[in-house]
Amino acid sequence: MLYRLTPPGQLESADFPSGAKSFKTALEQGADFDRLEWQRAKDRVFSSDILRIALRHGVPSAAGIVLTPMHITDLGRADELKLVQQQADELHAQNRRQSGARNEARLPGWTKAGEQLDDEVRATTERAVRESEARLAKVLAAPVDPALADHWVQLGGQLPD
């Protein structure tokens, strides 16, 4: 899959063989990415952050900027992980309120074991959040490609703040 950003603010996707090697090979062979069957992206929406990433890691096309998914994988990922962890914490707390005493009576140590497991899962999630944030920071730390920025503006797009 590839993404294409087009001014003023549309994000499209098209099927494309996965892998950096196939994308690099297509670039080296002068692929015309605009000839792909582009459709409005279903899994993401245009955002200033995606544009910031595209201006650093994309390639120009006649209609916009083409970007591989690998550069935006971590965009929003940390928030998703935090939300899932919050939902799990709430569910586990509810479970303990509803059946904790009964389970503890049947299986002494059930409460403590559950709390320990929750702590371990939470620590793993926090580590995954930090790793995701670090990868995204690295992607955004790359300098903007001036040629891509000029290309975007020439197409009628506005650069993000």
Image: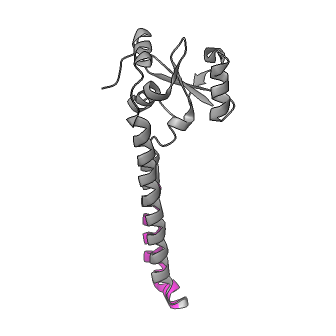
Asked if residue 28 lies left or right of residue 136, the reply is right
Residue 1, how many percent across, how many down? 63, 31
Frontmost residue, 94 versus 30: 30
Magenta residues: mostly which secondary structure?
helix
Span of residues in magenta: 84-105
Q: What residue is shown at x 47% (from left), y 27% (from top)?
A: 54
Frontmost residue, 31 versus 64: 31
Q: Is residue 98 magenta?
A: yes
Asked if residue 123 lies left or right of residue 159, the reply is right
Vertical arrangement, residue 81 with respect to residue 102, above or below:
above
Q: Is residue 66 visible?
A: yes
Residue 28, how many percent across, how many down? 64, 20
Asked if residue 144 lies left or right of residue 31, the reply is left
Q: What residue is shown at x 44% (from left), y 37% (from top)?
A: 139
Q: Is residue 37 visible?
A: no
Residue 30, how many percent across, how many down? 65, 15
Q: Quadrant of residue 37?
A: top right
